Structure formats: C-alpha cells, structure tokens
Amino acid sequence: MIYIGIDPGKTGALATIQVVHDRAIVRAQPFDESDYMAVLAMCAATCDPVVCALEHVNAMPGQGVTSMFNFGQNFGWIRGVLEANHIPYELVRPQKWKKEFSITQDKNQSIAVCKRLFPDVSLLRTEKCRKDDDGCAEAILLAEYARRKL
C-alpha cells in the first residue's frame, strides 16, 4: 500500500509512505510540478493500492489577492493530477489531521512529531539546507494520517 500526503502551500511538499513487508519506506520532496507529476504517475502505475490525504486549506487573513490566486491554481493543479492518475484522495482540514498528532499550528511541533515518528527521515528541503523543513514534515504527517485513517 502507498500512502501519499500533500501539503499544497507555497513551501509545500509531497510525501509517500510505502508499506512493504510491514516496513514503512518514507520519502518527502518539496513542491515541484514536474516531480509531483512523475511521483504521482509512478504511484498510480504500481500494483499497490494508493490513497492520498491532501490538505484542504482556505485563504488566510492578510493574504494578497495574487498569492491566493496562485495558491488556488496550485491546489487545483494538484487535484487534477491526482484525478488524472486515478489516485483516490481525501481533502483533510489542518485541524483534523493535526488533532491526530496532538499538534497546534506551530510548525516546530510538526517537525518534532515527525522526527519522533520517523527518526531516520531527513526533513531538509535540499542537501544544502541546515534547517528542517516544516512543509516536508507536514506532508509526511499527512501521509501518516492517510495510513492511520484512510
């Protein structure tokens, strides 16, 4: 079984948890349209069942019109790629999946919980980064939410 978690934000990420012989293989990558298309197509092409938890977020106070428009385009594009690859997905509000892990809106909590659950997984956005990435952490937690609930 392959579980996908997607944080669709500007600094979002896509994560997969593939369960093979009772062992979880966890991968995360920052948002990149061409990489997302390749990863989702690969997941859909496997013989394993696939399910996705896509974070369902709304506009936030103070966000500009242009940034919200761009976010909406990204969100719609991701949904389109999931549907084109026949990957079932569920829209999950942040409050719902974060409650599963007892975390708040604090991004550092997401990183801490992710490190506790998956200590061997790198949360660095690139090899040159020195700081763990909350987008990768939250995408992994969304994939874990899918594994637990979907």
Image (tube, rainbow, N blue to C red):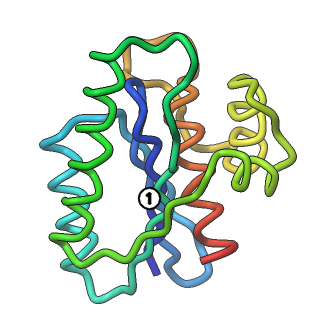
Between 36 and 97, the one nearer to me in the picture: 97
Q: Position of residue 36 (x, y in %)?
A: 23, 49
Residue 66 on image: x %, y %: 27, 16
**Extreme residue in the right direction:** 102
Location of residue 116 with respect to 31 vertically, above or below: below
Q: How many marks?
A: 1
The residue depicted at 52 percent of the width and 41 percent of the height is 57
Q: Secondary structure at mark 1?
A: strand
Q: At 55% across and 24% down in the image, what residue appears?
A: 60
Q: Which quarter of the picture shows residue 108? A: top right
Q: Is residue 23 left or right of residue 117?
A: left
- The residue at the point 71 percent across, 35 percent down is 110
In x, y percent, where is residue 148? 69, 72
Q: Residues within 10 Å of mark 1 (few under 14, many from 20)?
A: many
Q: Which residue shows up at 44% across the image and 67% down it?
A: 52
Q: Quadrant of the C terminus?
A: bottom right
- Decide: is 67 above or below 12: above
Residue at label 1?
16
Quarter of the view holding residue 116: top right
Q: Is residue 109 left or right of residue 89?
A: right
Identify which residue, 53 or 114, lies in the foreground: 53
Q: What is the three-letter code of the residue carrying label 1?
A: Thr
